[in-house]
Image (spheres, helix red, strand yellow):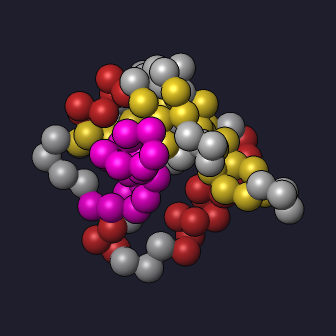
Amino acid sequence: MVAINTNPVSFTDTAKAEILRLIEDVKDATKNKLRVGVKGGGCSGMTYVLEFDEQHPNDQVFDDGTFSFIMDKSHGLYLQGMEVNWEGGLNSRGFTFKNPNASSTCGCGTSFAV
C-alpha cells in the first residue's frame, strides 16, 4: 500500500525518538506497524490508541518522514490535527495527545470526548 503524504497526526521530535526506540524493540513480525487510532472507553468516552499491530484492509498508511504509521480510515474524523508528544520526566512519563477535536479530556490526558 502506498503511503499518503498528508498526515492527520503529527509527532514532536521527542515522540519520534521514543517511537523509533520502540520500533527497534518490536519482536512480533506480524505486528510491526505503528497504529494510531481511537477506541471507545475511558472516563471521557474515547481513548487514544498507540500500539503495534498488523495492517487491516480499512487502514490508511501515512509517512511522517521518520516512520510510517497506520490508521483506520474512520478515525481521521477524531484525530485530524492531533499532535503526539513524549514526556520523559520524573513527574510525567509517557505519550501525551493534543487534540483540537476534543471537547473535553480526562485528567490523565488519554481519554477524550468530541
Residue at (35% x, 49% y) in the render: 41
**Toward the viewer: 106 or 60?**
106
Q: Residue furthest front?
A: 43
Residue 53 spot, x, y in % from top left: 33, 61
Whether residue 4 is visible, yes or no, is yes
Q: Residue furthest right?
A: 90
Taking 77 as reference, is 44 left or right?
Answer: right
Residue at (18% x, 52% y) in the render: 56
Q: Residue furthest bottom?
A: 27
Taking 103 as reference, is 21 left or right?
Answer: right
- Using the image, determine if residue 55 lies above or below residue 85: below
Residue at (25% x, 54% y) in the render: 55
Residue at (72% x, 41% y) in the render: 13
- What's drawn in magenta, residue-wise? 33-54
Location of residue 27 (image quadrant)? bottom left
| Magenta stretch holds residue 75 | no
**Dominant SS type (magenta):** strand
Taking 104 as reference, is 86 left or right?
Answer: right
